[in-house]
Image: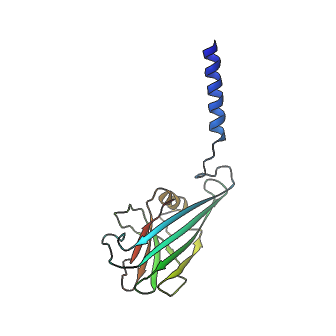
Amino acid sequence: MKARIALTTILALAAVSVAACDDDDDPTGGGTVTQNFSATLTGDAERPDPVSTAATGSAGLTATITGGTGGAVTITYSVTVDGLSGGASAAHIHGPATVDAAADIIVPLTVTGTGTSGAIITGSFTTTGNPNVSMDSLLVLMRNGNSYVNVHTTQNPGGEIRGQIIR
């Protein structure tokens, strides 16, 4: 009898614990969830061929998900670079790709500055603009480390620096 009461108590406590867990990847309750991502950009990370450059960079991305699963997603980004061979000619999020592979463009990023250093790529978006990749799919790629930020220059049109997006 004592074993049955103990088992019932353990199961009840487990049920309460599971109910109290909050999965911030899926705001099914209809609230707002914020998820932060980053990338460290280098020429060595470029694929298929690493680029010999002293340039480096970092990217910060914040996804705000409102209204639960399938709700509105806004991604805000800022890419800071140092020592590019020239001003950035383009920047993108690419995927799906591991650190050893190159992939197609998912989202173009807005180059807002003309220099070779500083926070020259900033903005936000609410759609990928890519008919093959939804915002929900992009978030899955970002959460799993299967997308990257790439900064292109005139001297390195395929990309001068790149970094895998991680949570």
41 over 5 or under it: above or below: below
Give the residue drawn at x 62%, y 26%: 10
Quarter occupied by residue 52: bottom left
The residue at the point 61 percent across, 51 percent down is: 24
Q: Pick whichever, 118 or 16, lies toward us.
A: 118
Q: Number of labelled discs?
A: 0
Figure coloring: rainbow
Could you tell me which residue is drawn at 47 percent across and 67 percent down?
39
Q: Quadrant of residue 158?
A: bottom left
Where does residue 12 sit, x and y in percent of width and height? 65, 28
Give x and y (percent) for residue 84: 42, 83
x, y percent for residue 139: 53, 59
* Residue in the picture at 63% in, 52% down: 27
Q: Quadrant of the N terminus?
A: top right
* Up/down of 122 relative to 144, above or below: below
Left/right of residue 71 with respect to residue 119 in the rendered view = right
x, y (%) of residue 43?
37, 74
Q: Residue lying at the far top in this picture: please name it.
A: 1
Task: Looking at the picture, tell me which residue is in the foreground, 122 or 103.
Answer: 122
